[in-house]
Image (spheres, grey):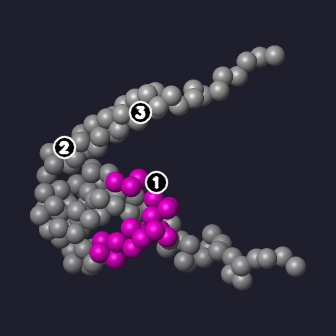
Amino acid sequence: MSILPQRILTDEDPQRTRFQVELEFVQCLANPHYLNFLAQHGYLKEKSFINYLKYLQYWKQPEYIQFIKYPNCLTFLDLLQHEAFRRELANPTCARFIDDQQVLFWQHYTRQRNTLLQTTGAPEQAKTTDP
């Protein structure tokens, strides 16, 4: 007797497809240039789109957040709840500034992480030698 779920999600399963599409969209929100595109094309002014952004807040719950690869997308999801932020995103200079700040954060984080690993005496990666 095998232990299988009664309902196995297949590629054609609408729930699986919806999950994947919503996950992909939420993670696209980490791209400031995509946000600029949405703002310039009027999506961020549409009531239905704003309601969709509110609906997507469920991705911050523990059972869903584990699937997020780009956690900064959730920060942008929060910021998109504010009209002033949505309005500013139409300005390409704003999108470039946000993009620059993300790059600087990643560089700083990586440098700090490497420094921390070196000072704590973390073991170096094992080197392979030929016998």
Q: Main secondary structure of the magenta part?
A: helix
What is the spatial separation of the Cα atoms under label 2 and label 1, in whole angstroms?
22 Å
The structure residue drawn at horizontal position 17% and vertical position 63%, both measured from the top left corner, is 86
The structure residue drawn at horizontal position 57% and vertical position 26%, both measured from the top left corner, is 124
> What residue is shown with label 3?
116
Q: Is residue 130 shown above or below 46?
A: above
The magenta stretch spans which residues? 53-72
Q: Nearer the viewer, residue 111 or 95?
A: 111
Q: Which mark is residue 2?
A: none
> What residue is shown with label 2?
97
SS at circle 2: helix
Was residue 116 drawn as part of the magenta stretch in this picture?
Answer: no
SS at circle 1: loop
Amino acid at circle 3: Leu
The image shows residue 83 at horizontal and vertical percentages of: 14, 68
* Circle nearer the N terminus (1, 3): 1
Q: For the view shown, which residue lies furthest in the right direction?
A: 1
> What residue is shown with label 1?
69
Q: Place residue 27 in its image quadrant.
A: bottom left
Residue 128 visible somewhere in the drawing:
yes
What is the spatial separation of the Cα atoms under label 2 and label 3, in whole angstroms?
28 Å
What is the spatial separation of the Cα atoms under label 1 and label 3, in whole angstroms?
23 Å
Q: Is residue 126 shown above or below 53?
A: above
Q: Nearer the viewer, residue 110 or 26?
A: 110
119 sits left or right of 49 in the view: right
**Numbered-mark total:** 3
On-image quarter of the C terminus = top right
* Circle nearer the N terminus (2, 3): 2
Q: Place residue 125 in its image quadrant.
A: top right
Was residue 54 drawn as part of the magenta stretch in this picture?
Answer: yes
